Image (cartoon, rainbow, N blue to C red):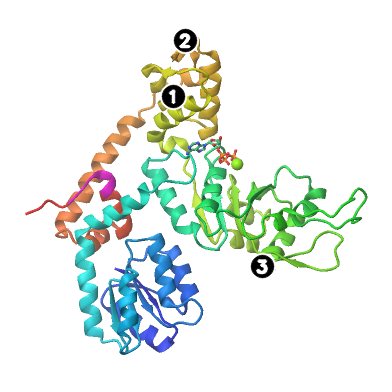
Amino acid sequence: MHILVADDDPAQRELLAGFLSRRGHRVTLAADGDEALAAFLREPVQVALLDQRMPGVDGVRVLERMKAQSPMLRAIMITAFGAVETAVNVMKLGADDFLEKPVDLTVLLQKLEQIETDLAVGEDVAQVEQALAAAPLPIDLIGSSPAMQETLSLVRRVADSPWSVLIHGETGTGKELIARLVHLLGPAPQAPFVEVNCAAIPETLFESELFGHERGAFTGAERRHRGRFEQARGGTLFLDEVGELPPSLQSKLLRALQEKRINPVGSEGDISVDVRVVAATNRDLRALVDAGGFREDLYFRLKVLDISVPPLRRRREDIPALIEYFVDRYARRPTRVAPEAKELLVRYHYPGNVRELEHIVQRSLTLARGSVLQPADLPDEVRSAPCEETGLLQERLDAMEHDMLLQALEHSDWVQTQAAERLGISERVLRYKMGKCGIRRRRG
Ligand SMILES: Nc1ncnc2c1ncn2[C@@H]1O[C@H](COP(=O)(O)OP(=O)(O)OP(=O)(O)O)[C@@H](O)[C@H]1O
Ligand SMILES: [Mg+2]
């Protein structure tokens, strides 16, 4: 299993890590609560072994936050000897168990084996995962396809953290929508969400736009102006098209992010601003860094957590629901979409992604004569879309995936750790794929 060990005592940490990895577990170490939370967000941890007393965020708080994001996480709290009262609280918080110091390794092993058996049954885990995925979103967003569900599950996990998030995806995939979702699911949804489009602001105005300026800072600056950073205080600053940020400003932005301080144009002193930064780009930022167009340190600052939004052609399952959604939104009278038109729309490849679909629906609705949208109302490029064989290919790939999963599970006696290993994937991915293919262990 993948186990996170959080303990501020290095000796204890090493002891547990050595012991667990010798027994075939994957171990991630954290020296305090913050590190534990960061590691938890980064890696698909299944079990957390938490020292209750740690400097900074203590084990109980860490657990609370982990469970809020991932109810399926299993946790064992390590408490001081005789601290039964807190242990009871810990159980209430959802820890599966607790161990008293000094940790008896044999007992620890027994507890882990129990967890492993529970996980192998898998069904309740899948259910919890489903329940989490089914919780309503605070925003209109169509996305029940597996590809989008994966993205949304990541959004739910990262939203609550204070770290910056980099969202990447092709044009029109819904990056801005995802950025708003990160904000709304985050710790301060009522705080401001302030957008800066890095491609739309002229270089000369950028600094004052972002950091503000004092009265008289330059000709025409008649009043003091609060920059976007200041406006976003306590909330989220959304840096859209961040790849377009001119080099001269990249270092200024980096400084603001590192020091959480900004210097308004024409001002003597700094002011402190605490904002959560979410950035989006449709460019390959890594390649841009390699080509010298983007500072590497800023890149790493921005992408502490990263989310990729899949192109629409990778989640065609969402197209019918999107059509319905946009028809409802834009039709001036009740309108139906003819099955033949729907078929064409599902087949088209959408280089402009969801935004293109939105425009196509809008345009076709204005052209439609009756209350039914017909193929003739659709733009040429949609009507003449080549009939790709992807349907057939996907069908075969799905069938093959189903068979391979089943075989691996049967061969490993349904022990998911082993099956995942056989397939060369993580257990988490295995469980996800099992859910997607509807594979469950037969009873008896
Ligand atoms: N999953 C979705 N459900 C409903 N509407 C969506 C979805 N994804 C995108 N949209 C809509 O599609 C349009 C484009 O989305 P958005 O502006 O978020 O894309 P983007 O990735 O930021 O695009 P660009 O790269 O051009 O900036 C918006 O009108 C948005 O409301
Ligand atoms: Mg956008």
Query: Looking at numbered disc 3 in the image, what kind of residue is underneath it?
Result: Gln
- Where 175 sits versus 297, above or below? above
Residue 334, how many percent across, how many down? 45, 18
Q: Is residue 438 magenta?
A: yes
Residue 333, how many percent across, how many down? 49, 17
Circles 3 and 2: CB atoms closer than 8 Å: no
Query: Label 1, on which residue?
Result: 345
The quarter of the rendering in which ligand 1 is drawn is top right
Residue at 32% in and 88% down: 101
Say which quadrant the C terminus sits in.
Answer: bottom left
First in sequence: mark 3 vs mark 1: 3
Q: Residues within 10 Å of mark 3 (few under 14, many from 20)?
A: few
Q: Which mark is residue 258?
A: 3
- Where 323 sits versus 53, above or below? above
Circles 3 and 1: CB atoms closer than 8 Å: no
Between the C-alphas of marks 1 and 2, the distance is 19 Å
- Where 401 sits versus 74, above or below? above
Q: Secondary structure at mark 1?
A: helix
> How many marks do you count on the picture?
3
Asked whether, in this view, residue 171 is left or right of residue 145, the answer is right
Tell me where residue 176 sits by quadrant. Answer: top right
First in sequence: mark 1 vs mark 2: 1
Between the C-alphas of marks 3 and 2, the distance is 58 Å
Query: Looking at numbered disc 2 in the image, what kind of residue is underneath it?
Result: Gly
Q: Residues within 10 Å of mark 1 (few under 14, many from 20)?
A: many
Q: Which mark is residue 370?
A: 2
Q: Read off the magenta span.
A: 435-440
